[in-house]
Image (spheres, helix red, strand yellow):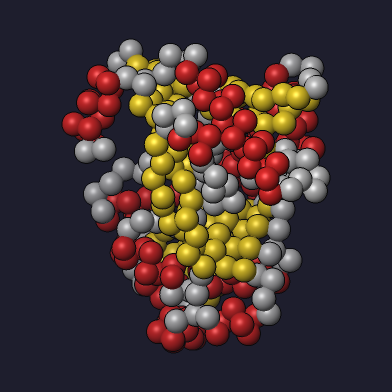
Amino acid sequence: MNNRQRYGEFCKQNPDMSIFLQDWWLDIVYCNDWNYLSVEENQQLIAVLPYYVKHKFGFRTIMPPPLSPVNGFWIAYPQNIGRIKRISLENQVMNDFAKQLENMRLAFYSHQYSFHFQNWLGYYWQGFTQMSKVAYHIDLTQDWDSIEADIHNKTRRVIRTAKENLTVKFNAIDAKTFWDINSKSFSRQNLKVPYPYGIFEHLFNELRSRNKALAISIENSQGQIIACLLAVLNAGVCDALVAGTDTDLRSTNATTLAYYEAIRYAKENSCTLFNFNGSMLQSVETFYRHFGGIQTPYNLIEKRYSTLYSHLRHLKHGV
């Protein structure tokens, strides 16, 4: 069994593993060019950290892949592990990964970890830095009336109006149409889409073939698609991934309705959690918060190994 096969078996043995760390997802977003670090016990994998090394201007860096709100490592915790031993295991795993990363002659490491993983002390002790970021999620184990009651009054009014004037369709939009609308959202801000169409199309179609895609399109009275949302369904979790609005037919109500219908669909299809996979932009945060989501911190973990790279990165990005 080769390394990739071992990783695939690890994924199968951990059905609650984040979809964004699963082997087939990594094959797509990394274009089959990825590897992983591992921690083993008794010749069994107990933790994995998938990565792709980017080479540019003589620097080697590990950065988050496109279309993947969660990166970093995954630990296969023993059943019924207690809190004290859990933290001890996490610290051991971080210590092992820190040493392996140190040996890779990197200039920079950066990954966004799941909000489920809050302990980063093991990395701190090895010189890594942490930035708290904020996302929102909705607990779908509540009854629907409670979920709706938590939605802001203004947002509820917007949804009622949108329902009267717009049509919602589920999994009726193709990858190219979705991409074209999504691209307009970036064009409106004079930004380039941060992922290539080829990767998006492959991922969109693969999610469909695995019955893990929720692609919602919103149409106006003329049958024109004015907004769309792609969410990912896996292991009882619904993750909002990509949304777009036709700037020529822009309607805030359409985007609001798309998210509302995604939450409702996830609830009706036995999901226990809806993740907005939030933004730190103030306007986007307000939009998510008004759905009644729970504010949830998650960790951006980084380490700068090269002073020169850090200086150049600061000149370009200001960080």
**In this view of the protein, can residue 219 be seen by the observer?**
no
Quarter of the figure with the C terminus: top left
Left or right: residue 12 compared with residue 272 = right
The answer to which of 94 and 73 lies nearer the viewer is: 94
The answer to which of 53 and 72 lies nearer the viewer is: 72
Left or right: residue 219 compared with residue 42 = left
In the picture as drawn, the residue positioned furthest to the front comes out as 84
Left or right: residue 211 compared with residue 95 = right
Seen at 50% across and 60% down, the residue is 296
Seen at 35% across and 26% down, the residue is 304
Seen at 51% across and 68% down, the residue is 294
Q: Point out residue 267 in the picture as x, y percentages from the top left corner.
A: 67, 70
Q: Is residue 253 above or below residue 126?
A: below
Q: Point out residue 271 in the picture as x, y percentages from the top left corner.
A: 69, 63
**In this view of the protein, can residue 237 be seen by the observer?**
yes
Q: Is residue 106 above or below residue 121?
A: above
| Residue 7, picture quadrant | top right
Q: Point out residue 40 in the picture as x, y percentages from the top left corner.
A: 72, 24
Quarter of the figure with the N terminus: top right
| Residue 34, picture quadrant | top right
Image label count: 0
Seen at 62% across and 58% down, the residue is 238
In the picture as drawn, the residue positioned furthest to the left comes out as 315
Q: Point out residue 156 in the picture as x, y percentages from the top left corner.
A: 47, 84
The answer to which of 32 and 228 lies nearer the viewer is: 32
